[in-house]
Image: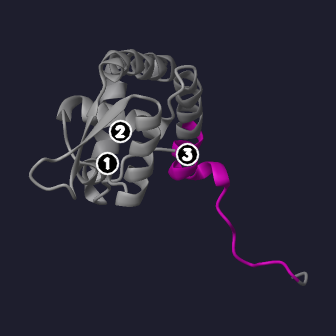
């Protein structure tokens, strides 16, 4: 055996499921991010807006909990969305230490547009799969997320 060589074999990079998941995910995510950017929204901001669309007025800590973000990360995103006039913030009358945040009317109109972009992105990338294959893939990915206790929503 030559110096510096190993006697064990190393599996091929492309033989790993994780490689292919990351490969596809990166392309799906990058295309989605580019489409969102045309609306001046990042993926992380979309995640917050979409969660808040269902919640109504809430606190930044609830947003952090729902998305799996740290409070600091959620707070920074809230600040960015406030600056973009997509959120409003009000101090609670009963306790000035706490704040409620809520989507602005502009954000309420924007979220369905962004949702349609997400739907088109999924249709484009997963069109080669039959409906049963897409359903199976979704179920398998959800099963893996549940089995590993994955809660943090993807924001990158």
Task: Give the residue at x 59% y 51%.
Answer: 15
The residue that mark 2 highlights is 48
Above or below for 18 versus 90 = below
* Discs 1, 2 touching: Cβ within 8 Å: yes
Query: Quadrant of residue 40 in the image?
Result: top right
Q: Residues within 10 Å of mark 2 (few under 14, many from 20)?
A: many
Residue 81 vs residue 1, the one in the foreground: 81
Q: Earlier in the sequence, mark 1 or mark 2?
A: 2
Residue under the point 32% across and 56% down: 150
Q: Residue at x 48, y 36 (%)?
A: 43
First reached walking from the N terminus: tag 3 or tag 2 = 3
42 relative position to 119: left or right: right
On screen, 32 above or below 89?
above
Q: Nearer the viewer, mark 1 or mark 2?
A: 2
- Indicate the quadrant where residue 139 lies: top left
User: For residue 96, which numbered disc appears in the image?
Assistant: none
Q: Is residue 145 visible?
A: yes
Q: From this viewpoint, which residue is outermost toward the right?
A: 2
Q: What residue sits right under mark 3 in the picture?
A: 22
Give the side of residue 71 with respect to residue 95, left or right.
right
Query: How many residues crowd mark 3 within 10 Å: few (<14), some (14–19), many (20+)?
Result: few
- The residue that disc 1 covers is 67
- Between 62 and 16, the residue placed more toward the observer is 62
Give the magenta range. Answer: 4-24
Question: How far across and down, in percent of the image, does residue 51 sit?
Answer: 28, 36
Query: x and y percent of residue 135 in the render?
Result: 30, 28
- Per the model, the C-alpha gap separating discs 3 and 2 is 23 Å
| Nearest the eye: 92 or 145 | 92
Labels 3 and 1: the sequence-earlier one: 3
Q: Nearer the viewer, residue 96 or 119?
A: 96
């Amino acid at each position: 055996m030559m110096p510096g060589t190993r006697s064990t074999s190393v599996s091929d990079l492309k033989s790993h499921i994780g490689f292919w998941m990351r490969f596809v995910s990166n392309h799906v995510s990058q295309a989605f991010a580019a489409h969102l950017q045309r609306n001046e929204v990042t993926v992380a901001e979309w995640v917050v807006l979409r969660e808040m669309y269902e919640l109504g007025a809430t606190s930044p800590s609830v947003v952090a909990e729902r998305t799996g973000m740290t409070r600091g990360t959620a707070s920074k995103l809230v600040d960015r969305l406030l600056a973009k006039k997509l959120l409003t913030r009000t101090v609670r009358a009963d306790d000035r230490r706490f704040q409620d945040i809520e989507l602005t009317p502009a954000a309420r109109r924007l979220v369905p547009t962004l949702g349609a972009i997400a739907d088109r992105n999924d249709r484009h990338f997963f069109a080669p799969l039959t409906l049963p294959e897409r359903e199976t893939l979704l179920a398998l990915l959800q099963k893996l997320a549940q089995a590993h206790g994955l809660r943090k929503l993807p924001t990158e």
